[in-house]
Image (cartoon, rainbow, N blue to C red):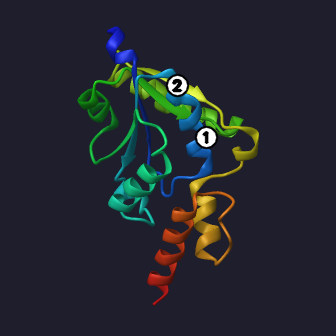
Amino acid sequence: MTVARTRIAVYPGTFDPITNGHIDLVDRAAPLFERLIIGVAESPGKGPALPLELRVQLARDAVAHHAHVEVRGFDCLLAHFVDQVGAGVLLRGLRAVSDFEYEFQLASMNRHLIPEVETLFLTPAEQYGFISSSLVREIARLGGDVSGFVPPAVADALQAEWKRTRE
């Protein structure tokens, strides 16, 4: 792996929606790399609540305070996306021990597909360890207040999406 590749990291996910936990990981990882690319996966098989374009825009808004962090949507194999952007590191978050088995499996598969890329695991700050996008979506869908878990624009987008789907 070239040194240039190790200076570029990809933080992939569906970010449906991006949460304060995701942003915390970006805030702590950004100083480690020359470029950090948030790769927002289309993931139609997961049936995302928010369309890809909106997830990308919400993520851009949430990390706009970092000049060298960019957000891109993608609809291909992660290994291909990582190769396209010339990254040498995959950034993944681990909230709890229960995440480790799945993330370890993904890291092993990615090591097979893109052996020149290393996976780096970061844990969120303690106050964000329990936040997940799926829980945030469920709370929002049932009319709960998600403002403590996501940026204001994300809370507004979720509220608008659930209102639209009920009409």
In this orientation, does residue 107 appear? yes
Classify residue 82 as left or right of residue 148.
Answer: left
Which residue lies at the image location 48% right of the left edge and 69% below the top edge? 157
Above or below, comparing residue 15 to residue 163 in the picture: above
Q: CA distance from mark 1 to mark 2?
A: 12 Å
| Whole-percent x, y for residue 37 in the image | 39, 35
Instruction: Specify the quadrant of the image occupied by residue 147.
Output: bottom right
Within 10 angstroms of label 1, few (less than 14), some, or many (20 or more) residues?
Answer: some
| Whole-percent x, y for residue 63 in the image | 48, 45
Q: Amino acid at mark 1?
A: Asp
Within 10 angstroms of label 2, few (less than 14), some, or many (20 or more) residues?
Answer: few
Classify residue 40 as left or right of residue 129.
Answer: left
Q: Which residue is mark 2?
A: 31
| Whole-percent x, y for residue 122 in the image | 60, 29
Q: Which residue is mark 1?
A: 24
In this orientation, does residue 104 appear? no
Farthest-out residue, right: 126
Farthest-out residue, top: 2
User: Which comes sooner in the sequence, label 1 or label 2?
Assistant: 1
Farthest-out residue, left: 84
Above or below, comparing residue 60 to residue 103 in the picture: below
Q: Secondary structure at mark 1?
A: helix
Q: Amino acid at mark 2?
A: Pro
| Label 1 with label 2: CB-CB less than 8 Å | no
| Whole-percent x, y for residue 116 in the image | 35, 15
